[in-house]
Image (cartoon, rainbow, N blue to C red):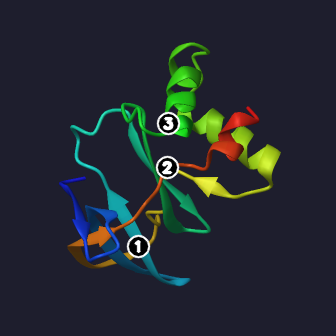
Amino acid sequence: MIRCGALGKRNLKFMQYRVSNYFTWHGRQKSILLPDQSYGQWIIYEKLLPKYHVNCFDTNSDSNIKIKELLSDKKQSIEKILERINKMNNTKLSLSSKPLFSVFLNSRLENLELKALPYPMVSKI
């Protein structure tokens, strides 16, 4: 994550991410890498596509606050939290989509709107 800003007249908030493109056995695949200093932040993928941005220090999102509580109070890892969310909501969320066997194509900055996880998914935990 590099910066946040509003684009267009709709006042949607987009973040600028470093997106790497790979060619795999299954076709083209995108992977988003957060900088090393992005402690407490994760990109969540759904069906190998970047879908959500979890930021434990964002107090504007109820789901981020709930995940922070689960991480600190209940001493759960983000992997275990995603595992429980997947089980309860019948989803396939994962942390990384970087393929093991791939050919790197390119990397560039893209403006994406990755929202926090929906609170109804997190509240059931």
Alpha carbon of mark 2 to alpha carbon of mark 1: how far?
A: 19 Å
The quarter in which the C terminus is drawn is: top right
Residue 30's mark? Answer: 1
Point out residue 82 in the picture as x, y percentages from the top left corner.
63, 42
Residue that mark 3 sits on: 64
Say whether disc 3 or disc 2 marks the residue closer to the N-terminus: 3
Residue at (28, 70) in percent of width and height:
111
Residue at (58, 38) in percent of width and height:
79
Residue 39 to residue 71: above or below: below
Alpha carbon of mark 3 to alpha carbon of mark 2: how far?
A: 7 Å
Which amino acid type corresponds to the residue marked 1 in the rendered image?
Lys
Q: SS class of the residue under badge 3? A: helix
Residue that mark 2 sits on: 116
Say whether disc 1 or disc 3 marks the residue closer to the N-terminus: 1
Q: SS class of the residue under badge 2? A: loop
Give left or right: position of 4 versus 47.
left
Which amino acid type corresponds to the residue marked 2 in the rendered image?
Ala
Which of the 4 image quadrants contains residue 54?
top left
